[in-house]
Image (cartoon, grey):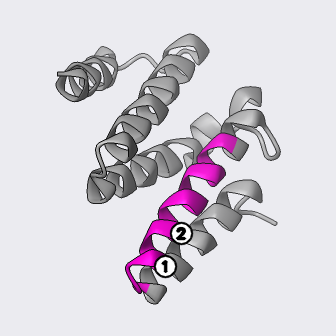
Amino acid sequence: KATSLLIRSINDFDNIGVATPDNLATKFSLLLMLAEVHEASNHLDGMREVILNAKEMICNKAVCCESMFAEGSDNRKKLSELFCRVARYCEGKEDFLGAEELMNDALDIQCDDET
């Protein structure tokens, strides 16, 4: 399955332990792919978990200094869009509190934590 292959690849990057820009970019891309696979299979809880992990990754002070994750970067925009899509699914299920939390996460991603 694509899901298990992506999860294994993401775990491999975690085990490398060297946070080079290339490793970070690849891991982030894999997280976004996994989120989209979960979305395509309507596994919204899995999608929410993955995007929260991606948010945690790019909000890490050691990582967010990388230009590819800087405020306003395409990577932050892509992740923010995924949060908005999950929020819309939550609204459709009348989980308005969950939708509000996800929209707040989307805004957090667009703006640096220090602003």
Which kind of residue does numbered mark 1 sit on? Glu
> Is disc 2 placed on a helix, strand or loop?
helix
Asked which quadrant contains residue 49, the reply is bottom left
What percent of the width, then of the height, locates residue 3?
A: 23, 29
Residue range in magenta is: 78-95
**Dot 2 and dot 1 residues touching (CB under 8 Å):** yes
Q: Count every numbered label the image shows and give the total.
A: 2
Label 1, on which residue?
91
Vertical placement of 75 versus 56: above or below? above
Find residue 113 and name its label.
none
Image position of 57 (left or right of 4): right
Asked which quadrant contains residue 58, the reply is top right
Is residue 110 or residue 58 the one in the foreground? Answer: 110
What percent of the width, then of the height, locates residue 63?
A: 59, 35
Q: What residue is rendered at 38% in x and 57% in y?
A: 48
Asked which quadrant contains residue 104, the reply is bottom right
Q: What residue is rendered at 42% in x and 33% in y?
A: 31
Vertical placement of 111 versus 87: above or below? above
What percent of the width, then of the height, locates residue 9?
A: 28, 18
Taken as a whole, is the magenta stretch helix, strand or loop?
A: helix
Q: Quadrant of the N terminus?
A: top left
Which kind of residue does numbered mark 2 sit on? Arg
Label 2, on which residue?
88
Is residue 65 or residue 43 the one in the foreground? Answer: 43
Q: Is residue 79 magenta?
A: yes
What percent of the width, then of the height, locates residue 72?
A: 82, 45
Q: Is residue 89 magenta?
A: yes
Vertical placement of 87 versus 7: above or below? below
> Is disc 1 placed on a helix, strand or loop?
helix
Q: Categorize mark 2 by other alpha carbons within 10 Å: few (<14), some (14-19), many (20+).
A: some
Q: Quadrant of the C terminus?
A: bottom right
Report, in whole angstroms, how far the alpha carbon at label 2 lies from the one at label 1. 5 Å
